[in-house]
Image (cartoon, grey):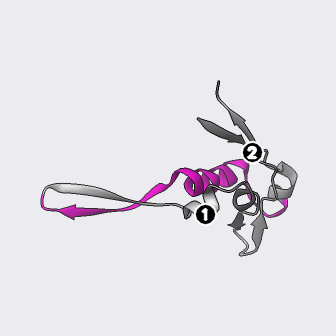
């Protein structure tokens, strides 16, 4: 499969009050999704997953320009350099 390597600018994230874990969590949700809630129908339960639309998450430019809200309500743009690579 195809993969990307994202290098987070630690100092820039820190200026905005974000930890590396904060940034990684947002990236994980954007790319892989996260269960936002659960719908219950009788005995069955269905997780409702949210993530970015394919146009944004399937594009290196979309990932590069990802904006993360900060604790101080400012926005932090990753402006990272995702590098594609393939698993042999």
User: Where is residue 73, by image quadrant?
Assistant: bottom right
Residue shown at the point (74%, 45%) measured from the top left: 6
As drawn, the label of residue 55 is 1
User: Which residue occupies the foreground of this view, 32 or 58?
Assistant: 58
Q: Answer with mark 1 or mark 2, whichever residue precedes in sequence.
A: 2
The picture places residue 12, in percent across and down from the top left corner, at 86, 57
Quadrant for residue 66, please give it: bottom right
In the rendering, at what x and y percent does residue 2 appear? 63, 38
- Disc 1 secondary structure class: helix
Secondary structure beneath dot 2 equals loop
Span highlighted in magenta in the image: 15-42
Camera-side mark, 1 or 2: 1
The residue identified by callout 2 is 6
Query: Is 78 on the left-hand or right-hand side of 47?
Result: right
Q: Position of residue 42 (x, y in %)?
A: 12, 61
- Farthest residue in the top direction? 88
């Amino acid at each position: 499969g195809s993969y990307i390597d994202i290098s987070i600018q630690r100092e820039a994230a820190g200026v905005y009050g974000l930890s590396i874990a904060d940034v990684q969590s947002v990236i994980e949700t954007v790319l892989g999704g996260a269960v936002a809630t659960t719908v219950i129908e009788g005995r069955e339960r269905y997780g409702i997953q949210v993530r970015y639309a394919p146009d944004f998450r399937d594009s290196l430019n979309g990932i590069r320009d990802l904006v993360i809200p900060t604790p101080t309500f400012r926005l932090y743009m990753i402006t990272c350099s995702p590098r594609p690579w393939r698993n042999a």
